[in-house]
Amino acid sequence: MENHNYKSNLELVLKNLEKQHQELIYGIINLGLAGEFHEIDEAFEVGDTFEFSVEMFENSNDINVNLLFELLEKNIETYEKLMNLNPSKIYDDE
């Protein structure tokens, strides 16, 4: 029988990777709008809505945004590998 504590910790790691994924996306967008793409941010009035996609900031000239993209890609890769390596351990009783 699989160690319940191990399974619980694995599920927690996956949930944390999901949260980090979202935080990295927010960071990329916010950093991009504060820096290289500030003119886009300035074009909007308070209350305006626009749905930004993280892909809009890909291939940025900002090294910091690019580093966050690398981390985001590694986050996705790690999450997918963990899911593929542990299908019987993850969420099997839900």
Image (tube, grey):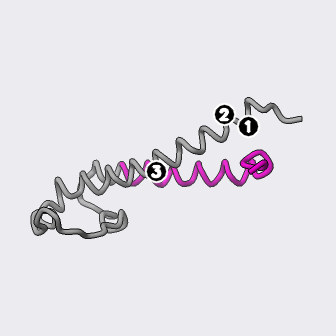
Q: Is residue 74 left or right of residue 56?
A: right
Which amino acid, by three-letter code, is at mark 1?
Lys
| Circle 3 or circle 1, nearest the eye | 1
| Magenta region, residue range | 68-94
Secondary structure mostly seen in the magenta stretch: helix
- Could you tell me how far apart the alpha carbons at marks 3 and 1 are, in whole angstroms? 21 Å
Q: Is residue 68 left or right of residue 94?
A: left
SS for tag 1? helix
Could you tell me if the residues under marks 1 and 2 are in contact, i.e. CB atoms within 8 Å? Answer: yes
Report if residue 7 lies within the magenta region: no
Which amino acid, by three-letter code, is at mark 3?
His
Report if residue 71 lies within the magenta region: yes
Which tag, 3 or 2, sits closer to the chain's start?
Answer: 2
Q: Which image quadrant is residue 9 in?
A: top right
Which numbered dot is residue 7?
1
Question: Measured from the top left, where is residue 39 in percent x and y?
Answer: 11, 65
Residue marked by disc 2: 9
Q: Which image quadrant is residue 10 in?
A: top right
Question: Measured from the top left, where is residue 17 in percent x and y?
Answer: 53, 45
Residue at screen point 16% across, 64% down: 47
**Callout 1 environment at 10 Å: few (<14), some (14 to 19), or many (20+)?**
some
Question: Measured from the top left, where is residue 24 in percent x and y?
Answer: 39, 49
Question: Measured from the top left, where is residue 1 in percent x and y?
Answer: 89, 35
- Could you tell me how far apart the alpha carbons at marks 3 and 2 are, in whole angstroms? 18 Å
- Could you tell me how far apart the alpha carbons at marks 1 and 2 are, in whole angstroms? 5 Å
Which amino acid, by three-letter code, is at mark 2?
Asn
Which tag, 3 or 1, sits closer to the chain's start?
Answer: 1
Which numbered dot is residue 21?
3
Where 33 sits versus 68, above or below?
Answer: below
Residue at screen point 31% across, 54% down: 28
* Tally of numbered discs: 3
**Callout 2 environment at 10 Å: few (<14), some (14 to 19), or many (20+)?**
few
